[in-house]
Amino acid sequence: MEYDDEEEDTVADVISEGQQVPQMKARGRRTQVMAPKVDIPQGWTPPCFAKTADEEQFLVGVMGENKLLKTLTPSDRHTLMAALDKQDFAAGAVIIKQGDAGDKFYIVIDGECDISVEGKGSVMKAKKGLTFGELALLHNAPRAATVTALTPVKTFTLDMLSFKGILMTKMESDQTAYLGFLDAVPGIADLSKGEKQKMASALKEHVYEAGMPIITEGDVGNEMFIIRDGEVKCTKNGSAAEVSRRLTRGDFFGELALKSSEKRAATVTTTVKTTVLSMHRSAYERITTSLEELLARQSLGQQRS
């Protein structure tokens, strides 16, 4: 099922604990209201259902293509993958009905479903690898379509409690881990506790295989990066010559483009599998000038030209 980028961008808002969640504006077809904070029962732990190697490979591919799930960190997707349960439907079964409340989403493993909208009839067919019901994870909107099994259908399913419980718990543990990590990063460790908390809450994790460019010279830059694990090299103008020492855990790069409208000054490429934490320009600007001053001093120690 299709949904737009604004809906995709609200994932963090929905699962952030203790924040007032805003209402989404009506966009013609229906009014969509953000789901309220989900209360996770004390002692709750995420479910874990065994998967075969083939099933895991299948889910990795599906999650990598899904607009909602591909925005999550690899570790988040792994935990959600484990929580997916199987549910089978006989031919003719109504899997979801337009207008009903929704609390699950589905991934088709095998079989074929018809997706229909009242007044329009059949609008598409759902086959292996297609997902539907994602909006139930984000909104209190009623089901927007009816999904009927045309053949016997096998699915993976995930309920709203598991999705939000996993992500809320993970966000809390990530922020704690990020704070500990930032305390050991030269320069950033000198920020105030409040500034480091703001920074930790704004960080997003990305994993790059060896040989992949993280930033490319000449591109517009809206993010800075801190290396959590791995190593990168910095080059210019397509030359193999490196313009700085290799950057490793605790080193950062990309901040220069955030201080001006200038484009990326170098290409940064992984030399091994590397995990980085990124921070967007908007968050960078919220953490006062003290971060800029500290990073400017520390970049000299990284021998970057």
Image (cartoon, rainbow, N blue to C red):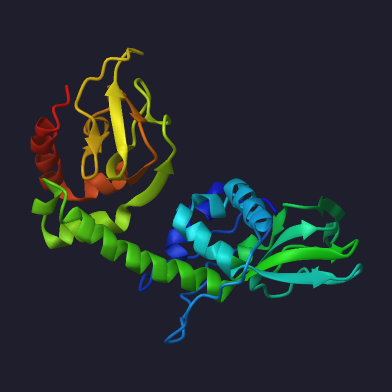
- Against 156, residue 290 (above or below) is above
Q: Position of residue 18 (x, y in %)?
A: 35, 74
Q: Does residue 275 appear to the left or right of 97 in the view shown?
A: left
Q: Which of 215 and 133 is in front in this view?
A: 215
Residue at 79% across / 64% down in the picture? 154
Q: Where is residue 297 in the image (x, y as percent from the top left)?
A: 8, 36
Q: Nearer the viewer, residue 212 or 113?
A: 212
Q: Residue furthest front?
A: 53
Q: Does residue 172 appear to the left or right of 290 in the view shown?
A: right
- Against 178, residue 102 (above or below) is below
Q: Residue 193 occupies which quadrant of the picture?
A: bottom left
Q: Residue 138 occupies which quadrant of the picture?
A: bottom right
Q: Position of residue 116 (x, y in %)?
A: 83, 59
Q: Does residue 143 appear to the left or right of 286 in the view shown?
A: right
- Against 107, residue 57 (above or below) is above
Q: Can residue 20 be seen in this view?
A: no
Q: Residue furthest bottom?
A: 42
Quadrant for the C terminus in the image: top left
Q: Where is residue 130 in the image (x, y as percent from the top left)?
A: 72, 53
Q: Can residue 53 be seen in this view?
A: yes
Quadrant for the N terminus in the image: bottom right
Q: How many numbered circles are shown?
A: 0
Residue at 50% across / 70% down in the picture? 164
Q: Which of 169 and 27 is in front in this view?
A: 169
Residue at 54% across / 47% down in the picture? 5
